[in-house]
Image (spheres, rainbow, N blue to C red):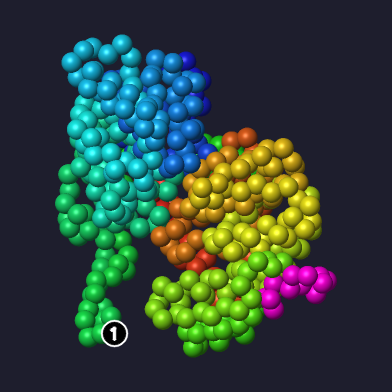
Amino acid sequence: MNELNFMPHQNRVLNQTEHFNRVAYYLDMGLGKTFVGAEKMYLLNNAVNLVICQKSKIDDWVQHFTEHYPDYAVFDLTSKSQMVTFRNRVETDKYYKPDSQIVGVVNYDLVFRRNWLLTLDNFTLMLDESSLITNENAKRSKFILKMKPESVVLLSGTPTAGKYERLWSQVRLLGWDIPKKAFWNSYVDTRWVENGDGFKQEVIVGYKHVEHLKKKLAEHGAVFMKTSEVLDLPEQVEQKIMFAVTKEYQYFIKNSYLIFDTRNMVQFKDDSDFYGRDVTPRVELVGDNNLTKTLYARQLCGQYHKEKLEGFRDLVQSTEDRLIVFYNFTAEYEAMKTIAERFERPVSVVRGGEDNRTAYERHDNSITFIQYQAGAMGGNFQKANKVIYFTLPLGKGSCDLWEQSKKRVHRIGQDNACFYYYLLVKGSIEEKNLAALREGKELTDELFKES
């Protein structure tokens, strides 16, 4: 084993999977999946190794291997020059005994654009956040399932997002050669229902034989472990802050149409000016299908909800502690950022194309805004212990984003109780959404329970 000092639960996981060359480490957030996965890859001892991760994690993986595994030659495959060097090394190592092992690190959104990776053989494939291939019809998933690794390491704290059917693509990589139809017939309960157009469609109504599923997963190198089993982390306290539903929201839900002046939404009683002055004053919302109606309903509970913005302002005024704020839409961020700056709070942001954590690192009264897709699944923010959910990710299938967002502060190194503030509009889509997220969490947690 490497010279790293592993925690007892990490050693237990590695020992438990010692004889597997295909493994899934479904370890709860904060249990050190990075260290366990990297060590397993090292022990598998293949000359060529490929890590696929989120774009935001590229630098973290490159640094981890460079710092802890000096025998590795590490390449960032998002760099064209390093990609060429890595590819040349792969070709050379086919004919000559390599002097060192090589590791290439690439992100999910780029991997399927590197067709030559399909020519790799006798290599170890590691997927960080393997839940990102649960949609087997996505380009990334199709590409990865075509690869022919000798060894596989899957890492995730939320492998299914509460939907067991999403495990199929991962079990395929573990070497469980079960057809998708057979997997569904064995573990997924469905029924045919009228869709309103005179046709029937198959919908999932539950799951079955869960204990057998867990047994089969264990036989194929899958390990499930919850933080509460091995670590004594600080208490987590959740608090709902409820706001009244607006007449605009009610009108839109009834008519699927709304036109209004946003200045009435963002002006505050004690301000001569209004926050979010750059927004278009007059907005027209047309919910002509379920997708757009849901989108606008969520926005009417967020960026266009005056009382909720006032509630966010009140939270900012109530504490000088670091705050972490999760949000969905750019307009939400812009409105909240204006509020933060009005009270002279240093601001950091993690969102698509931007990752600036300077204020978070330097100022104990900073506010860090994190867009779910960009930062919920990665990053250590345990300098803070207060999290605000201005809006939530959508639906049961997003429970992984929600659960992982909590672990940005509740992890090793956190000494204080963690507080989570949910800003919710009563009687709106938000309450139903939170219930759906919790249902997804309960189904995920079932896989982690000991048989």
Q: Residue at x 32, y 52 (%)?
A: 134
- Residue 184: tell me if it is visible: yes
Q: Residue at x 47, y 64 (%)?
A: 394
Residue 266 lies in the magenta stretch: yes
Q: 212 or 444, which lies in front?
A: 444
Q: Residue at x 80, y 74 (%)?
A: 269
In the rendered image, residue 440, in percent from the top left (x then y), is placed at 43, 60
In the rendered image, residue 341, in percent from the top left (x then y), is placed at 74, 55
Q: Main secondary structure of the magenta part?
A: loop
Residue 298 lies in the magenta stretch: no
Determine whether 28 is above or below 238 in the image. above
Magenta stretch in the rendered image: 263-274
Determine whether 134 is above or below 300 in the image. above
In the rendered image, residue 61, in percent from the top left (x then y), is placed at 45, 31
* Residue at image mark 1: 196
Q: Amino acid at mark 1?
A: Gly
Determine whether 333 is above or below 157 in the image. below
In the rendered image, residue 431, in percent from the top left (x then y), is placed at 55, 71
